[in-house]
Image (cartoon, coloured by chain):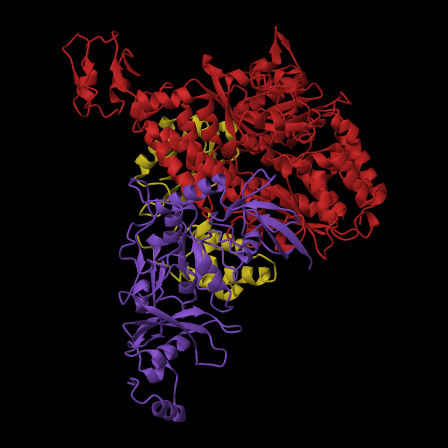
């Protein structure tokens, strides 16, 4: 068992070892290596080992190396920071380490050519906190990611970890916790935005011999990895919050339902749970009170629909993840028919901070309707792919252009897709929309779990809609008719359109199908499945019409609608004609060649072999 | 293609699975964990193994088959020694994952969800792997390959041949 | 348990407060269409056909899974509701074989009935269809996957009998199917041919094999009888045509008994003018059996029956 005194002792002791990276001390060096999803996949582990080896060789006793959670800037990974200066190195390869150790760590000379390009402005080197990507961010859910060693519970404790749990069980009644949560108005970060405090209250008020807390870590939206980064970078924040929730509603058992596609997160959670149990922060008589709480991991097995609350519960129960009819609230009858609270990872990660700093502090960030921050995963056609946490209410433009650095390769922004398969595409004219639950909803998209995929002029919006429908059809559980049958028909129509076989009636049919699926489906997956189609038809109807009426893809992306064409630049070398597998190119030597588009199979060989780039797709 | 389950060759795995089942029998909702374990041990879920799980856990075979065919990570056919997972998440898709997949299919001569006759490679189109910063991404067993181009594929596959 | 008063299509009705809307409507003779609902089975909410409009509620709600509340005002056939039903029926027909002309279920098929009621027709399209798989392995049940609408009633009724649970959903999404055990034929599976699933199937996906081709419902007389194989007396139907009893089929289990093959064969034996050969499953194979074996009669009992049924058509 752990007492509050012991907790504080660990905190004081461990803080001393972290002073460098918290920039409270300036003798010695601390190398922080990003162990986030992207960097982990590109060798962060080996980079750490090599750093340690070189440092040992050089006998640098006052240099410490730590593998931390996600830094956010996945685009430039593997990333390394050096403290106390806060110098940001990016795209580090094993070969680069010698140089950093020799000059920076030994002599204090910064290796400019390895610096993150955004940290040099007008010839001056900026510390990481001043870099554009980080400047506008406010970190609550990601407060510890990239700072602490995720496998060391003491470092979590050092930064006020488990203080919120101590405060709650030692000083507060469950009612007080719920009042505080309601006052803070933390809205669920998993999609729909239901206030967590109100949910907790419903379960609290429903008497039962057993209640459960579930953390939904089945982050299935393609292009979203916020939850993964939190679980991998700061697992204890989720464990602590689940225990707080358990205390508030009267539950002694929690489950984390996590997708099996995240083996690293599973491993780090296992380590974290074991450490918390060893320290008595999970288990019986927490902080010497009669409050007991333990957490078990449950793995998904590849079914997007299990992100839906009742499907998730079915899955934990060992069944097919098919959503239940909405007869009872899950806060009354959920897992095994018992009152159950289910919140997602990011929602939970906010809880300890709210308990410690209060509702007023939380509400001072973000907007009235949506207090606090939101984590987004920026991806697609954007310079700074990565993870950002921003206060609610800043605009899409600020996120995409100021933080994200805009569109690479001089291309033009076309739309941003938010909310994954349940969300929609937001066009240019709405870039100044503030990001909060209500505003995104008004535009026909949703906040969703926080995936943000940027699309540029080369992306065909019909094909993007087709992509998401393809996903939904694959992931529909098959239980209710509108989703099972309707999404399939919708996909078939979209496939026809991108293949140039669409008819004007298809557009009407898409609209009526969208209505049926939205209004008729059983669960949230079905009810939002048509959003990608509805929103693209609303903002990019001209693209649909071009495909249908003119058999043309304005973005030049739909293969079936493209034509290969030889421009005036042709020098008549005959190479294309000789290589064409169907002999559909004619022309005399040293004269411009012509493609017979009727015979062309669009294999692209001519384009590949042309020495002067005279063959284009149009 | 018919893959025959070899009881003798799998004796050790069966013993291990039985021990695992015994340890987890009392746990509510243990089926998912048991199927994961079986999938790890055998590389797929042969009907013979499902039948055994049914007997040991006292869960009807129909229910087990229903669960095994619902989740995409469970497979009824053997996976290759090298399991290739190509990410078709949104970020990867807009960065050209489809072309990578086509190339992969061409190089290996199998479709998504299939295994090469020598049981060496199998291809799966996976959901977002959460490594969007590296898009497009593919995994071969535990190795992650990011920022791929079509031209990289053959060379990568050759490393495993 | 208290009562609540609600208004359905302008009519007031007072019902117990744990009623679902669909049950309350039934009390006043309003028939809300539903394919997956059965008062004897767990609620599924899958077919979505029973959606109704509740005044002041934003969304349509399924009447099979929404409980009544005091003062509720419900419309079961509003334009919005009817349009939704048409769309849903159309989606089902788009994935259903157009063979009502020869389908054994014609005349009793709920999908057919609702399509007529809401004027929804088959249409030509080249989209994907359900696989055309027919399981003819059982002499008692014909399972035609192409006609299945995945309402799941068969799965739920099979699961009500503790040691059966033969049927289950398999696969996912558009490719979901109903399978027996590990996707076996009914013959290979542990199916005991009780025909509970056939009783609840709203379409022609599960039909009584021994009825096949013998008569259409509108050409026959149907009489309900109690099974005499044991004291519980499950419900069967004797179907006759031109004064001749030609077939027996299961109708409903009785309290405490699940329906069984022995009961069915006993009823056939008692009522039919020319009962067909009985089959028993032996080691996963259906084999012809004598009536004595089929009815598990022996010794003295055998004599008694022979005495009683003299001339009715013993073996």
Q: Measuring 49% from the left and 37% from the top, which residue is drawn there?
A: A518
Q: Is residue C295 left or right of residue A330?
A: left
Image coords of residue A556 (percent x, y): 35, 19
Closest to the observer, C74 or A90? C74
Q: Is B7 situated above or below A617?
A: below
- Tell me, by letter, which chain the rendering colours yellow: B
> Can residue C227 be seen in the rendering of this structure?
yes
Q: Position of residue C37 (x, y in %)?
A: 49, 55
Q: Position of residue B15 (x, y in %)?
A: 49, 62
Given residues B113 and C65, the one toward you in this image is C65
For the question of whether residue B83 can be seen, the reply is no
Q: The chain drawn purple is chain what?
A: C
- Camera-nearest residue between C126 and A557: C126
Chain whose colour in the figure is red: A
- Residue A337 lies, in percent from the top left, at 63, 55
Rendered-image quadrant of the C terminus of chain B: top left
């Amino acid at each position: 068992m752990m007492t509050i005194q012991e907790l504080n002792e660990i905190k004081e002791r461990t803080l001393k070892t972290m002073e460098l990276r918290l920039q409270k001390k300036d003798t010695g060096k601390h190398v922080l290596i990003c162990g986030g999803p992207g960097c982990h996949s590109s060798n962060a582990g080996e980079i750490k080992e090599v750093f340690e080896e070189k440092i040992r060789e050089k006998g640098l006793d006052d240099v410490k190396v730590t593998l931390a959670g996600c830094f956010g800037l996945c685009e430039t990974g593997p990333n390394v920071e050096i403290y106390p200066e806060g110098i940001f190195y990016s795209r580090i390869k094993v070969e680069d380490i010698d140089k950093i150790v020799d000059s920076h760590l030994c002599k204090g000379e910064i290796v400019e050519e390895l610096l993150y390009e955004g940290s040099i402005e007008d010839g001056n080197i900026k510390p990481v906190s001043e870099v554009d990507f980080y400047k506008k961010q406010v970190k609550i859910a990601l407060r510890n990611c990239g700072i602490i060693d995720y496998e060391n519970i003491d470092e979590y404790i050092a930064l006020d970890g488990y203080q919120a749990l101590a405060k709650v069980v030692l000083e507060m009644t469950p009612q007080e916790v719920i009042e505080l949560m309601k006052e803070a108005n933390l809205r669920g970060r998993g999609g729909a935005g239901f206030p967590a405090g109100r949910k907790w209250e419903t379960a609290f008020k429903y008497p039962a011999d057993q209640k459960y807390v579930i953390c939904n870590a089945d982050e299935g939206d393609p292009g979203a990895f916020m939850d993964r980064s939190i679980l991998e970078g700061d697992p204890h924040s989720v464990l602590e919050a689940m225990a707080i929730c358990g205390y508030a509603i009267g539950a002694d058992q929690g489950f984390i339902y996590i997708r099996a596609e995240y083996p690293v997160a599973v491993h780090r959670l296992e380590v974290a749970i074991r450490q918390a149990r060893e320290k008595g922060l999970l288990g019986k008589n927490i902080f010497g009170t009669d409050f007991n709480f333990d957490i078990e991991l449950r793995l998904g097995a590849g079914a997007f629909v299990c992100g839906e609350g009742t499907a998730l519960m079915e899955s934990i129960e060992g069944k097919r993840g098919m959503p239940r009819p909405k007869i009872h609230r899950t806060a009354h009858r959920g897992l095994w028919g018992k009152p159950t609270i289910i919140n997602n990872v990011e929602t939970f990660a906010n809880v300890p901070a709210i308990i410690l700093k209060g509702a007023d502090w939380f509400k001072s960030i973000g907007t009235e309707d949506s207090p606090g921050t939101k984590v987004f995963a920026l991806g697609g056609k954007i310079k700074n792919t990565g993870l950002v946490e921003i206060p609610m209410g800043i605009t899409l433009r600020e996120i995409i252009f100021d933080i994200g650095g805009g569109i690479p390769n001089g291309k033009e922004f076309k739309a941003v897709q938010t909310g994954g398969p349940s969300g929609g595409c937001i066009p240019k004219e709405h870039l100044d929309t503030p990001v909060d639950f209500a505003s995104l909803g008004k535009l026909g998209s949703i906040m969703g779990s926080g995936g943000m995929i940027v699309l540029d002029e080369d992306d065909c919006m019909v094909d993007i809609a087709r992509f998401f429908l393809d996903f939904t059809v694959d992931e529909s559980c098959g239980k209710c008719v509108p989703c099972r049958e309707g999404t399939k028909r919708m996909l078939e129509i979209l496939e026809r359109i991108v293949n140039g076989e669409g008819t004007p009636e298809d557009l009407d049919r898409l609209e009526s199908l969208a209505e049926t699926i939205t209004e008729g489906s059983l669960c949230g997956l079905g009810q939002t499945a048509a959003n990608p189609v509805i929103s693209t038809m609303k903002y990019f109807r001209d693209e649909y019409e071009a495909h249908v009426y003119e058999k043309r893809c304005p973005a030049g992306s739909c293969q079936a609608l493209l034509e290969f064409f030889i421009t005036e630049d042709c020098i008549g070398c005959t190479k294309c004609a000789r290589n064409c597998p169907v002999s559909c190119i004619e022309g005399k030597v040293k004269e411009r060649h012509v493609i017979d588009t009727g015979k062309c199979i669009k294999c692209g060989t001519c384009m590949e072999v042309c020495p002067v780039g005279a063959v284009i797709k149009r | 293609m018919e893959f025959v389950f070899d009881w003798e060759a799998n004796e050790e795995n069966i013993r291990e699975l039985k021990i695992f089942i015994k340890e987890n029998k009392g746990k509510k909702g243990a089926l998912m964990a048991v199927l994961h374990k079986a999938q790890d041990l055998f590389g797929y879920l042969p009907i013979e193994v499902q039948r055994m799980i049914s007997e040991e856990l006292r869960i009807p075979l129909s229910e087990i088959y229903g669960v095994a065919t619902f989740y995409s990570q469970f497979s009824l056919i053997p996976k290759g020694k090298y399991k290739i997972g190509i990410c078709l998440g949104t970020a990867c898709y807009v960065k050209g994952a489809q072309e990578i997949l086509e190339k992969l299919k061409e190089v290996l001569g199998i479709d998504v969800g299939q295994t090469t006759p020598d049981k060496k490679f199998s291809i799966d189109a996976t959901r977002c792997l959460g490594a969007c910063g590296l898009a497009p991404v593919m995994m071969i067993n535990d190795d992650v390959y990011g920022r791929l181009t079509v031209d990289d594929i053959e060379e990568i596959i050759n490393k495993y041949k | 348990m208290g009562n609540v008063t609600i208004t359905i299509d302008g009519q007031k009705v007072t019902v117990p407060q744990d009623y679902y809307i669909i049950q309350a409507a039934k009390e006043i003779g309003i028939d809300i269409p539903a394919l997956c609902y059965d008062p004897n089975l767990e609620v599924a909410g899958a077919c979505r056909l029973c959606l109704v409009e509740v005044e002041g509620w934003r969304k349509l709600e399924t009447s099979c899974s929404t409980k009544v509340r005091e003062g509720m005002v419900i419309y079961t056939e509003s334009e919005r509701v009817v349009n939704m039903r048409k769309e849903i029926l159309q989606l089902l027909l788009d994935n259903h074989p157009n063979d009502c002309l020869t389908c054994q279920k014609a005349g009793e098929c709920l999908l057919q009935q609702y399509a007529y009621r809401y004027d929804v027709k088959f249409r030509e399209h080249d989209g994907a269809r359900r696989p055309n798989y027919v399981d003819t392995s059982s002499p008692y049940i014909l399972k035609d996957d192409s006609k299945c609408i995945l309402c799941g009633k068969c799965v739920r009724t099979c699961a009500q009998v503790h040691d059966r649970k033969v049927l289950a959903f398999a696969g996912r999404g558009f490719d979901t199917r109903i399978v027996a055990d590990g996707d076996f034929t009914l013959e290979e599976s542990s199916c005991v041919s009780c025909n509970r699933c056939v009783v609840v199937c709203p379409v022609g996906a599960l039909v009584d094999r021994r009825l096949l081709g013998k008569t259409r419902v509108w050409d026959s007389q149907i009489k309900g009888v109690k099974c005499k194989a044991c004291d519980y007396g499950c419900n069967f139907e004797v179907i006759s045509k031109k004064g001749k009893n030609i077939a027996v089929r299961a109708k409903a289990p009785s309290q405490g008994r699940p329906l069984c093959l022995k009961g069915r064969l006993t009823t056939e034996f008692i009522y039919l003018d020319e009962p067909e050969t009985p089959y028993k499953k032996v080691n996963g194979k259906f084999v012809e059996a004598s009536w004595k074996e089929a009815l598990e009669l022996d010794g003295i009992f055998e004599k008694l029956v022979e005495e009683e049924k003299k001339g009715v058509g013993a073996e």
